[in-house]
């Protein structure tokens, strides 16, 4: 089990360890857990394995995981990709395209990471400049963002290292307008709603917070959980 000290934050609204479970449905581990349905992802001792073709986890649209980036939110996961996934855009998280975190652009054994948020006039998208995630290795990925203003940019963390616009991260789509609500949109892990962006590889320790974690807090998650994977 992971360090219980990391699971007591009242702003941790979704916590799915994805280990040592074996059912087609399961509950996330935060207080009053959220029911999730597993479709074709294979249980492993310390993670779930997606097949790069059809696997997905459907976690519904519980109000507790709605619009987590209003006022600031954080997403976090451990991933071990075999490739950049189906269509070269394997999903880590996908809130039915209202927001998502994915990997892309595999080359020379590594991939980039990208965060996306839907807005009503023009969407926002941010991609790491370099391929900062290695294929075939466990990597901790996190992103913080506040969707309340189009001038805000996310920070993407890879193994506790921050990538910001101007320092390793590029805004390749500039948001205009206001964020589009995701209240009615399903949270998928490892795929898109259309089942055409399947993750290829293992993932575990999936987290959503409805506040922005500091860099120190994200580094603490990385350091306290990496012993399970590194």
Image: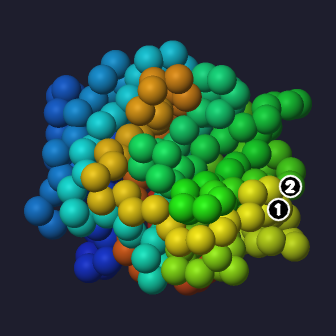
| Residue 227 position within the rendered picture, expressed as x and y whole percent measured from the top left | 51, 55
Q: Which residue is drawn at 47% across and 53% down?
A: 98
Would residue 188 appear left or right of 88 to someone viewing this image?
left
Q: Is residue 52 visible?
A: yes
Q: In the rendered structure, which disc, 2 or 1, sits on the residue that comes first in sequence?
A: 2
Question: At which x and y percent is residue 127?
Answer: 75, 54
Query: Which is closer to the viewer, label 2 or label 1?
Result: 1
Crowd rating for badge 1 (residues with CA inside 10 Å; few <14, some 14–19, many 20+): some
Secondary structure at badge 2 equals loop
Relative to residue 23, is residue 152 drawn left or right?
A: right
Whether residue 114 sits left or right of residue 146 in the image: it is: right
Is label 1 in a helix, a strand or a loop?
Answer: strand
- Choose between 76 and 219: the one closer to the eye: 76
Look at the image and tell me whether residue 200 can be seen.
no
Q: In this view, does 10 lie above or below 1?
A: below
Say which residue appears at 22% left-offset and 63% top-offset.
63
Q: Residue furthest front?
A: 121
Answer above or below: position of 175 versus 48. Answer: below
Residue at numbered disc 2: 129
Residue nearest the observer in this picture, 44 or 161: 161
Q: Distance between the residues labelled 2 and 1?
A: 6 Å
State the image coordinates of residue 41 (x, y, percent, origin top left). 37, 24
Q: What residue is drawn where x is 82% and y is 46%?
A: 131
Tell me if label 2 and label 1 are in contact, CB under 8 Å: yes
Residue 46, percent from left and from top: 39, 39
Q: Which mark identifies residue 105? A: none
Query: Residue pushed farthest left?
Result: 32
* Circle 2 residues within 10 Å: few <14, some 14–19, many ≥20: some
Answer with the quarter of the image where residue 124 lies.
bottom right
Examine the image and state in which quarter residue 204 appears. Answer: top left
Residue drawn at point x = 39 percent, y = 69 percent: 68
Residue at the spot of label 1: 170
């Amino acid at each position: 089990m992971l360090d219980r000290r990391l699971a007591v934050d009242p702003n941790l609204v979704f916590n799915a360890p994805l280990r040592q479970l074996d059912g087609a449905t399961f509950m996330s581990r935060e207080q009053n857990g959220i029911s999730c349905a597993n479709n074709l992802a294979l249980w492993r001792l310390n993670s779930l394995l997606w097949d790069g073709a059809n696997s997905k986890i459907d976690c519904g649209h519980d109000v507790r995981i709605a619009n987590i980036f209003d006022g600031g939110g954080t997403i976090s996961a451990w991933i071990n990709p075999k490739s950049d996934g189906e269509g070269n855009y394997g999903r880590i998280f996908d809130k039915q395209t209202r927001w998502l975190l994915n990997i892309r652009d595999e080359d020379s054994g590594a991939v980039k990471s990208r965060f996306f948020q839907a807005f009503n006039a023009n969407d926002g998208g941010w991609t790491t400049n370099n391929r900062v995630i290695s294929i075939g290795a466990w990597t901790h990925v996190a992103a913080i963002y506040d969707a309340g203003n189009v001038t805000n940019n996310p920070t993407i963390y890879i193994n506790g290292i921050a990538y910001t616009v101007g320092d390793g991260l590029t805004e390749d789509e500039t948001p205009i307008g206001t964020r589009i609500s995701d209240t009615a949109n399903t949270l998928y892990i490892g795929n898109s709603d259309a089942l055409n962006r399947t993750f290829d590889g293992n993932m575990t320790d999936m987290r959503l917070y409805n506040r922005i974690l500091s860099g120190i807090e994200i580094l603490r998650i990385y350091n306290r959980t990496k012993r399970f994977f590194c």
